[in-house]
Amino acid sequence: MFDYLKFLNLTSSDLFNTLLKFTAFIFVFLLLEFIINKIVQLFTKKTETDLDDKLINIIHRPLQISLIIIGIFLFFHDLDVSKKTLLITHKILNSFLLIIWTTAFVRLTKLIVVKILFKLFKISGLRQDAVPALASLLKLVLITVSIIVLLAIWGVDLAPMLTSASIMSAVILFAAKDTISNFFAGFTIMVDQPYQIGDYVDLSTERGEVVEIGLRSTRIKTRDDIMISIPNAIIANEKIINESAPEEKFRLRVAVGVSYNSDIELVEKILLDIAIENKNIHSEPEPRVRFRSFGDSSLNYELLAWANNPEIRGLTIHELNKEIVKRFRENNIEIPYPQRDLHIIPNKQKKD
């Protein structure tokens, strides 16, 4: 394994040659420490970002331990020990190396991969809420692969284990199909971005403010101050009306009917004044009034206006309706109710 170090066999003593090789590794170890501490860290301190400093801190310790383990490998390889002892030693040291570097890669995932994903999601406009979930999934993959490699190092037959794992996975997938469905639906919601935290949404069953978006469910706070947790699989298959997107303001439509004897110019002026005076109505775009149709008992108008906050939609409509009734009464404008005229035709008896 270490035949390339034969040039260090300066004497006929195997023990002395082994110690000489081990000393050479100590020199390499100290040289690496000098390069990292005096040269590399001096360079990284001059950079604007602290990412390189954190990167050095993560790989510094694994490099140190790896060199020590290689030195131990060399020491035992050149000693006159049985093949069984040498094999067990190799397995133990390889296991240590695997654990050390798996831990380092997991930390690197959190440091580098997460930052890269955040930047990619930001550039592409995707929801960054999905990044922690992807990072956790990547960590799980790294740990799973490391466990498989560790078992292979110790000569464990993986075929029966993989068969059992496949059967167990099928059972788990069947038992947790709803949870898995919610997980993928949650990931889809995070990527598709139909809503975000703080938005006011209207689903087929509920309406309220989004307070939390998880991988399994979304939590909505209703106008009754009730917290509702809805599985993401249900939301993903529903029609979602986001009243906060693309802007917070939203359009109100207030229908009102007046009698046929009303002054239509005065009706329009009163409705516009009421909208302009309401503190929750936007001045841009301006409110407008439209004469929609001739009804059976009334002239049907519609007041159109943009309001500031969808959360108080009900309150805004309440204020507008109340003021409309008040102003119409002050100006003798009648809001008619459906009427029918009944004509009675007298029965004319035939003369004898």
Image: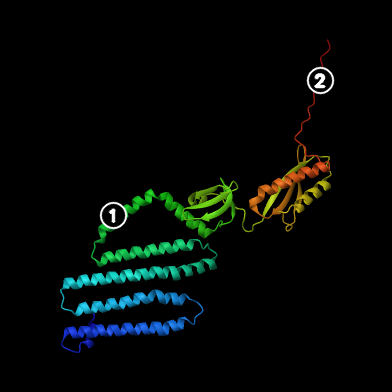
Residue 213's tag is none
* Lateral position of residue 209 relative to residue 91, left or right: right
- Which residue type carries mark 1? Ser
Quarter-wise, where is residue 113 in the image? bottom left
The residue depicted at 51 percent of the width and 49 percent of the height is: 229
Distance of label 2 from label 1 (alpha carbons): 94 Å
Dot 1: within a 10 Å radius of its alpha carbon, few (fewer than 14), some, or many (20 or more) residues? few
Residue drawn 66% across the image and 50% down it: 312
Amino acid on which disc 2 is placed: Pro
Q: How is the image coloured?
A: rainbow
From the image, tell me which residue sits under label 1.
164
Q: Quadrant of residue 149?
A: bottom left
On the image, the x and y values in percent for residue 5 come to 24, 84
Q: Which residue is mark 2?
A: 346
Residue 309 at x, y = what percent?
Answer: 66, 54
Which corner quadrant holds the N terminus?
bottom left
Mark 2, other Cα within 10 Å: few <14 / some 14–19 / many ≥20: few
Closer mark to the observer between disc 2 and disc 1: 1
**Image height of 70 relative to 340, above or below:** below
* Residue 63 is at least partly visible in this image: yes
Rendered residue at 51%/66% (across/down): 121
Is 190 on the left-hand or right-hand side of 272?
left
> Left of 281 or right of it: where is 200?
left
Relative side of 287 to 205, left or right: right
Rendered-image quadrant of the C terminus: top right
**Circle 1 SS class:** helix
Tell me which numbered mark, 2 or 1, is placed earlier along the sequence: 1
**Total numbered labels:** 2
Question: Can you give x and y, in whole percent of width and height, for residue 190 in the image?
Answer: 51, 58
Please determine whether, in this image, residue 129 is positioned above or below residue 66.
above
* Place of residue 196 in the rendered image (x, y in percent of width and height, measured from the top left): 56, 57
